[in-house]
Amino acid sequence: MFSRIARPSLAVCSSARNFSSSSQNNAKVAVLGASGGIGQPLSLLLKNSHRVTHLSLYDVMHTPGVAADLSHISTKAKVTGHLGIDQLADAVKDADLILIPAGVPRKPGMTRDDLFNTNAGIVRDLCEVCAEVCPDAIMGIITNPVNPTVPIAEEVYKRKNAFNENKINIFGVTSLDVVRANTFVAELKGLDVDKINVPVIGGHSGVTIIPLPSQATPAVSFPQEDRTRLTERIQNAGTEVVEAKAGAGSATLSMAFAAARFAYKVLDALNGADNKVECAYVRSAKTPAAYFATPLLLGKNGVEKNLGIPKTIEYEAQLIENAMPELQSNIKKGIDFMSK
Ligand code: NAD
Ligand code: LMR
């Protein structure tokens, strides 16, 4: 292990147990894939947060340099760098929150599903160690395709006897869809983007991304033609970035922002804050699909309460119905991968 600062005392123990109802922040956050296009700016945002006391950076390359660089920033989080699979257990030991942006991104012409063959194995291997070392830590999976990588993670936990059916602590991070929806709606309506919230439900690819502008706060209204154009822009926003980057990867900076938004809410909820709600993709009984993103009330164990599908207008109800075949097939692909 490459450690910039002395390791924490082993007496500092794991997951939600670190947190009391006091306002003291004391979180270890591990980023797996920390040297990548998302990993580096995400780690910077986490290092800049008062919520984090230990930032643990894991990758198969470059973590000594990234950790050295971040460790010179004058904020309180201790930074440690961990390189290669032999150092993964150390990286995640005692973690409260693990964020996984490890894996390959799209190039123009590819779908997220085209990443499955490479990224499914990466997520499986990382989760095997997490399930053994820190099964109670909250996990946010960013690696695409999210629709099957989250089921893969839970299947790994089942195999390792680390799965708790009464608890949901493995999340697919879909916050970027919400961030985009907020941005585009604010632009269209001339609203303050800081004050707008547009729920986005479903999954994280193409038609499975289901924005619900009819449920935005503050309320906004659109002629159907504009609503359709807005919906399609949000569904295709990842591709918009992939094409603009022209072979140099997919969204990294906006994703880092979105993952930090997710992480801050999780950490605040772990720390006892009320009313921390975020849309994310989790095991769910709210639709026929076994995994589905909805607004979630966050708490000390992960999902405190699944707030379910908000009220929808007819057009949005149809989007949900249209998404089901692809979403269910993506979920099956993940589960089948683990049964081989
Ligand atoms: P990147 O190639 O820039 O970085 C990926 C990092 O993962 C690299 O540093 C690489 O060394 C590391 N890595 C690869 N295999 C690893 C392993 N086995 N263990 C640990 N680290 C490993 O890619 P990126 O742009 O950061 O994107 C990462 C992933 O995030 C992609 O799958 C991409 O599609 C996905 N993504 C998801 C969302 C979302 O909304 N959920 C948004 C953007 C990107
Ligand atoms: C995104 O929505 O930007 C990510 O899922 C990356 C991608 O491949 O589109």
Image (spheres, rainbow, N blue to C red):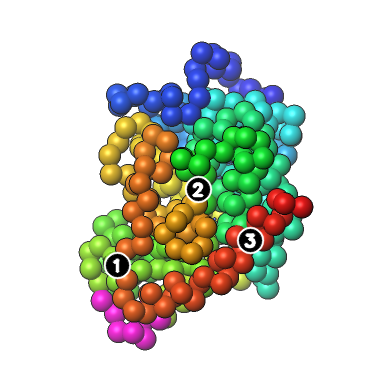
Mark-to-mark CA distance, 1 and 3: 28 Å
Dot 2 or dot 3, earlier in sequence: 2
On the question of residue 217 being in view, the answer is: yes
In percent of the image, x 50 and y 72: which residue is there? 323
On the question of residue 72 being in view, the answer is: no
Q: Helix, strand, or loop for circle 1? A: loop
**Circle 1 residue:** 311
Secondary structure, magenta segment, majority class: helix
Dot 1 or dot 3, earlier in sequence: 1
In percent of the image, x 60 and y 60: which residue is there? 331
Indicate the amino acid at tag 3.
Lys
Indicate the amino acid at tag 1.
Lys
Start-end of magenta stretch: 221-228
Q: Residues within 10 Å of mark 3 (few under 14, many from 20)?
A: some
Going by the image, does 340 lie left or right of 94? right
Q: Is mark 3 within 8 Å of ligand 1?
A: no
Q: Helix, strand, or loop for circle 2? A: strand
Q: Position of residue 326 (x, y in %)?
A: 58, 70
Indicate the amino acid at tag 2.
Phe
**Circle 3 residue:** 332
**Circle 2 residue:** 171
| Mark 2 or 3: the one toward you | 3
> Is 280 in the magenta?
no
Q: Position of residue 325 (x, y in %)?
A: 56, 72
Q: Position of residue 19 (x, y in %)?
A: 39, 25
Identify whether 273 is placed above or below 305. above
Mark-to-mark CA distance, 2 and 1: 23 Å
